[in-house]
Amino acid sequence: MSQSPDDDQDDTSDMNARNNELAVMLDSGLSMSGKERHCVFLNTGADAESEGRFACISAVSGLDFPDDGRGVSVVDWDRDGDQDLWISNRNAPRVRYLRNDTVTDNNSLAFLLVGNGTTTSRDAIGARIELILAPKALDESTTEAGADETSSNTVKPSGETETDSNKLIKTLHAGEGFLSQSSRWIHFGLGKGAEIAELTVHWPGGESETYTGLAVNRRYQIHQGGKAVESPMQADPPPPPLIPSTPELPPLADRFRIPLVALVPMPDLPYIDSSGITKNLLSTADGGMLLVNCWSTSCIPCLKELQEFTDRAGDLRDAGINILALNLDEATGIEHQGDSPDAILKRMGFPFAIGYATSKVAVTLSTIHNVMTATGGELPVPTSFLIDGSGRLTAIYKGPVSVDTLIADKEHSSLPPWERFRRAANLPGLVVESEVLKEAIEKSDRFSRTRLASHLEEMGWAHAASIQYEALAASLPESEEKQDELANVFFERGILLARRNDWTRATSAFEASVESNPDSPKAHYNLGLAYQRMGQTQLAHEQYEWAIELQPKLISAQANLARLLAKEKNWPQAAIHFEKVIQARPRDETSHYNLGVALAMQDKWKEAAEQFQVALKLRPDFSQARKYLERVKEKLQ
């Protein structure tokens, strides 16, 4: 009995899920917030009628802005004893300062804790303050509405002493809410007529200290092991004055200029010229910059824009900018009611290249537009793509673009990332250069490139997608922190090439991925698969073993290694790995069959028969398993 196990299709790893929920929303043209207004909830404390529930005061609070809000920081900014708010937004205004000017005679108290630097950090993160109010204030002390909704006043349950009900507790946290860090000053809203009995600080190291003689409407600094030192409410220097303002949004317009921060390689898409010859976009640039202008004969603004290009052809050529007037009529199903696109442009005297897009190219350009502008839907006309001399997409224009704007954007791609980021902002303001922002720009760049590469691959432009991955890998700095990310770039490129059956280049990509991150089981597994497809079985064997050592439950590696061992007639080891596959996939009839063959080759007839019987039970028409079972039964007689 010399037949080897079925060599069924090798398992392959799918690419990482690139389109997360955000990407799917953007691809669909959806907003991440829309017109949803901010919500504000009031802690009603011990109010009997509310039964401990929060009250929605969004409308009456004045805080229900339609902003696309993100982080909220709470701080007594003007040091008047009540809490003010700073809110960051994704859109305009990017930052809001909301000063609390509520007129009230309520009291407050604030503490700044400083740890000893040994058992407790200097910032005292994790410290807990217990503030005990004097019993005589019991009937007057209430939660300060509008000033400190986050105060954790304890509602007195049945049987609890009056002293316990006057205990206020707060903990110092690092990070509060989404993308936010409020002030380290711990603020208590005390209501009217409150007096302080004592204060206890429980430090993170386990030590507790109690302080007395504290007065309301004060700010105290407390050093671990020291005294509570009073700080004036109005510190010197005071916060800088802030002038109230109303955000001025840009007026609605029929044209948008979108200079890009991420300079992705523009796919060298084909088009058909006036004589019916297929050409490529980048060859039309003739060594300079190229504006791919998408237009339609039914679009009046398109014709006016093309006329301006014609009238100022000399200025464009002096600036080194070529034009490709790419007509989308046929691609979008528009029938010509009058002259053809060629005839229209020739009558205009249009001196630049003329081309026609196929429906696939039109959809691809729409996809590029949507990915780079974070929008969805069909490509509007006119839309133009400005490509620099290195073949990188540098700007997108929705609606007509003037020649002066094109000339002004000529140097955009040569600017440093900070300046490109500033020029790309839709709203006026300052750019604060920092490592945090730098990392955010880099992440946005990588996100755009990987999304574009993914879409290009799905649409059949595998070579263009591969170029995106190459550019992405080249853009990553060679640092230890970026090795995992670099490894993933090489891995994704390897998967792309493997899907094209370009196993030679896929092998090189997987080798680079393993070199960048030797602890990645999926990289070892896919490198093993590439080696196996290249006929390098010993190297494939080693990579599968590496993958299994790093991730024993990687069943794809177990299955491929088992089949490889079976081909090498290493039946004992093949049987071990087939058994592991069956443990994870008990209803995999092929693995039961393969294990049966491996056992039969070792003359383990009874065990082999059991495996063939399971395979037939799972798939009654499994003829190969039935034949083997009959042969095994003969051996058992």
Image: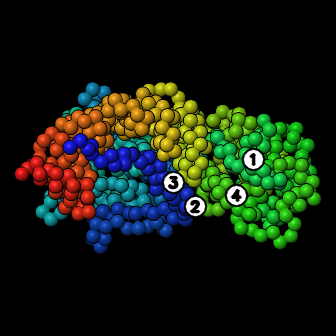
Name the secondary structure under disc 1.
Answer: strand
Residue drawn where x is 31% and y is 67% of the image: 53
Task: Point out the residue furthest to the left here.
Answer: 637
Mark 3: secondary structure? helix
Q: Is residue 259 visible?
A: no
Q: CA distance from mark 4 to mark 1?
A: 12 Å
Q: Nearer the viewer, mark 2 or mark 4?
A: 4
Residue shown at the point (83%, 38%) measured from the top left: 320
Q: Secondary structure at mark 4?
A: loop
Which residue is depicted at the point 48% across and 52% down? 19
* Foreground of the two, 544 or 323: 544
Q: Which mark is residue 358?
A: 4
Crowd around label 1: few <14 · some 14–19 · many ≥20 (10 Å)? some
Q: Which residue is mark 3?
A: 23
Residue contact at pointers 2 and 1, CB within 8 angstroms: no
- The residue labelled by disc 1 is 279
The Cα–Cα distance between marks 2 and 3, rounded to whole angstroms, is: 10 Å
Residue 29 badge? 2
Three-letter amino acid code of the residue under disc 4: Thr
